[in-house]
Image: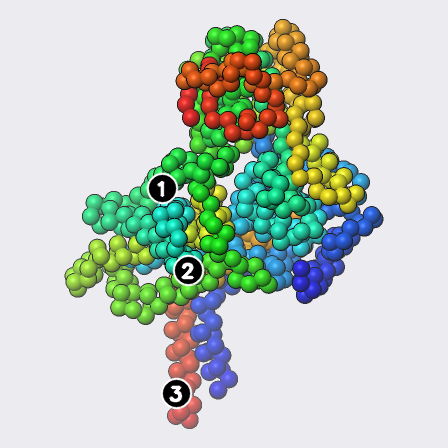
Amino acid sequence: MSSIDRRTLLKLVGLIGATAAMPFSLARAADRPLVVGFIYVGARDDFGYNQAHAEAAAIIKTLPNVVVIEEENVPETVAVQKSMEAMIRQDGATLIFPTSFGYFDPHVIKMAERFPDVHFAHCGGLWTEGVHPTNAGSFFGYIDEGQYLNGVVAGFASKTKKLGFIAAKPVPQVLRNINAFTLGARSVDPEITTTVIFTGDWSLPIKEAEAANSLIDQSCDVLTCHVDGPKVIVETAEKRGAMTCGYHADQSALAPNGYLTGAEWNWETPYRAHVATSQAGQPMINFLRGGLKEGFVKTSPYGPLVSDEAKARADAVKAEMLAGGYAIFRGPLKDNQGNEVIAAGTALGQTDVVLESMDYLVEGVRGQI
Amino acid sequence: MKPRNAVYRAGGLLLPGLPTLLAALTTFVLFMLFLVVQGKPAWQACQLVVQGAFGSAFAWENTLQRAAPLMLAALCVALPARAGLIIIGGEGALVLGGLAAAVTPLWLPGLPVVPLLLCMALSAMVVGGFWIGLNGWMRQKRGLNETIGSLLLSYVAIAIFNQLVEGPLRDPASLNKPSTIPLDDSVMIGPISDAFQVHWGLVVGVIACLLAQVLVRNSVTGFSLQVVGGNVRTARMIGLPVDRLVILTCVLGGACAGLAGMFEVAAVQGSANAAIIAGYGASGILVAFAARQNPLAIIVCAILLGGIEASGSLLQRRLGLPNATTLILEGILFTSLLAWEALTPRIVAWRLRLNERAEQTQGALQHG
């Protein structure tokens, strides 16, 4: 940070008078508020990925001695680098949450190297010891637990025994959700199948609507998804009288009738942890993970079409997950080509890194990678 | 009599800037109005726009960095426009150019950095040039509308890009963000200097605009292009190689877009992945039209757009305005620029009249 720059900025602050109390020195003092920056890749009110983050950011805003600054619709280009730099240099941010998966490499890494006194808490889970700067870190949640519970509820609700899943790209994170959803449903009735459609990108509302219509036309009566904004899918399903399980955030307002339950992020937990660390002046938490038990993910309240039997079963599984040690991926497990992917007697715990390079669809999924 | 003469001359020189000045004023008034209606602090917002774009050394870095890819992307529209073509598919050439640049090091292992970078740039330009050149060829030889053709081919290009990056060219280690094998750190193009954190794409963009200016204003080819763009029949009648000229502008335009893709890969992303499909092609169309297809004006308009984007970032953080505010400011600005351009014929007339007056007073002076 050059001195000229700092002087110009101080002038600027005096001029607008709004943020005069913000620190421009990176040195932390107890009475100075912690400036926390949030960067979203899409709109803050997308009923999906970005909204889940923005809702948690709104909670952080209410914490004492914390100033929150936000920026939405920031693409994964040099724009996000400049936005991070601007938060640091113009607003004095010392903790930044770049919330999109694609921000990490190379953008967060580059900025973390340039600003070693600032903490960069990235959402996605790519930080590797010895490779990445120690003032950067990543957190993520095991949301496949929520998708498994979605599957259980969908399994009870479906009459056609055909479920639909609209997915962005066949990458490990998405495949894990499709598989967990399918395993949850087949734990209720092994006859159930999930038809999957890949749209090809994270936010393609038109294709998502087409995919939803096409799945309903193929008599799938419960839909769920893994795209950035499930809004269009949930609305389309509601219009057509199909049921939905939500993803990312609570979409029940979009489908008061057909919304069964949903797998939601609860980013408040990791956010609070990072804010507390920064406020205490402690070193960065580089690797942070959790599921239902740790409060990183949560489920939407049950909708009107969920039967008592479904609630009882889902709640029982949820209780097991909350107790810890529940393994969704257990052998013997076959993929949908008939190959054994997990041997009998093997149970992969949620923290097992093998699950993070998943490259198959389990038996019962109609579709291919 | 002499001062009046100077006024006439100055007026004649300043008149061409009148539409731009009026556009800036209109934008200012409309944007203020837009904010006031919503009960937002309009004056403060306008100050932030200026400060965020040009108010400090960092603001300039921010602005210029965002402007860099737009210059090359805009040339992809402006060059074919000299020959009367409206090409809107620059995005396709950009992403394929980026992909070509990203895979070049795999085919040329062991090459020293500088020649390797040149080869990457060359392959990006060849691929980009081919892609847009294809549009020119289809228009001249197959009678296909180049606007629709380029738009559709751009979708094809993006589909090919995704297919290759998620398929045969994917780095198996890129799990949740499919990418090509990353470039070695030594190949990455750094910032111009540590004190000026903008990558070299800016310099190349400016040079490309200057070269384009020389081409269209000061060369025989440029003059021929003007004839082709003005009236194809005349051009054919006087024996100009119309097809060749049209395809040439397309190839050059596409090469610029391809080069933009190369910088996205080699100066920003480090590999080819979906992040380079960021809409630079579309922003390039905006810049080229606002610049009235003039290469020098492209530099200014790209910086203006970069500045608006940079200040949009500050507006969001300081006033909590949604990102759409930036889009509205951009929309108002460019619409007013184009709307006030309707004044051009009148300005030409006014200018002639002013020049006449100046000559008359001059004459009166000499006779007196």
The mark found on residue A335 in the picture is none
Circle 3: element type: helix
Q: Tell me the amino acid under the disc marked 1.
A: Ala
From this view, report whether residue A355 is shown above or below residue A68.
above
Q: Tell me the amino acid under the disc marked 2.
A: Val
Between B304 and A169, which is closer to the camera in this rendering? A169
Per the image, the residue denoted by label 2 is B114
Residue B241, position as x, y percentages in the image: 19, 59
- Report whether B345 appears left or right of A31: left
- Report whether A241 appears left or right of A72: left
From this view, report whether residue A330 is shown above or below residue B43.
above
Per the image, the residue denoted by label 1 is B157
Residue B279, position as x, y percentages in the image: 46, 45
Q: Residue at x 24, y 49 (%)?
A: B137
Chain of the residue displaying label 1: B
Q: Tell me the amino acid under the disc marked 3.
A: Gly
Q: For label 3, count other residues whose C-alpha is less than 10 Å away and answer few (under 14), some (14-19) or many (20+).
A: few
Residue B123, position as x, y percentages in the image: 34, 52
Per the image, the residue denoted by label 3 is B363
Q: Residue at x 44, y 68 (%)?
A: B16
Q: For label 2, count other residues whose C-alpha is less than 10 Å away and answer few (under 14), some (14-19) or many (20+).
A: few
- Report whether B293 appears left or right of B316: left
Earlier-in-chain disc, 3 versus 2:
2
Q: Are marks 2 and 1 in contact (CB under 8 Å)?
A: no
Camera-near label (3 vs 1) is 1
Camera-near label (2 vs 1) is 2
